[in-house]
Image: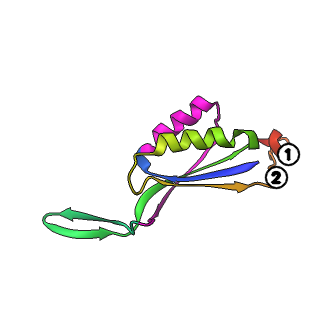
Amino acid sequence: MKQIKAVVRPEKLQDILRALDNTGYNGIMITEIEGHGIQKGIVHQWRGEKYRLELIPKIMVDLVVRDDQVETIKKAIIEAARIGEAGDGKLFIYTVDDAVRIRTGETGDAAL
């Protein structure tokens, strides 16, 4: 099993959810976060004054998937999230040792 964690633009969330739905995957966790990457924030202008926004709103999408689903899910998220500009986000993949469905006690892939 793998955990896929994607940090993406908030405005791309619906596109990502649609793309994941098209893959047949339906278990997802969403967290609203703030942060910055290489660009170190963005500069805005309001009433002629410039100010720097250090932390940019982002969405963190978390999924735990079977090993055979990783490439399909990864491709779907990347295609749905990409604008082609700095700030498109990052995708991380971690190994998950085990999962347990609390209600039934099922473990491993069966718990997903």
Q: Where is residue 51 in the image (x, y as percent from the top left)?
A: 25, 70
**Residue 106 within the magenta-colored segment of the rendering:** no
- Residue 27 visible at all: no
Using residue 85 as the reference point, say whether residue 94 is left or right of it.
right
Secondary structure under badge 1?
Answer: loop
> Nearest the camera: 69 or 24?
69
Q: Where is residue 11 in the image (x, y as percent from the top left)?
A: 40, 45
Secondary structure under badge 2?
Answer: loop
Which residue is drawn at the image coordinates 39% and 69% (left, top)?
40
> Nearest the camera: 28 or 19?
19
What amino acid does circle 1 point to? Answer: Thr
Where is mark 1, residue-wise?
Answer: 107
**Start and end of the magenta stretch?**
12-38
Q: How busy is the neighbourhood of tag 2: few (under 14 within 10 Å), some, or many (20 plus)?
A: few
Whichever of callouts 1 and 2 sits on the residue coming sooner in the sequence is 2
Where is mark 2, residue-wise?
Answer: 98
Q: Where is residue 56 in the image (x, y as percent from the top left)?
A: 40, 62
Q: Give the image quarter of residue 105.
A: top right
Which residue is drawn at the image coordinates 70% and 56% (left, top)?
94
Which residue is drawn at the image coordinates 58% and 32% (left, top)?
21
Is residue 24 shown above or below 96? above
Which residue is drawn at the image coordinates 76% and 54% (left, top)?
96
Q: How busy is the neighbourhood of tag 1: few (under 14 within 10 Å), some, or many (20 plus)?
A: few
**Residue 25 within the magenta-colored segment of the rendering:** yes
Q: Which disc, if any, is residue 48?
A: none
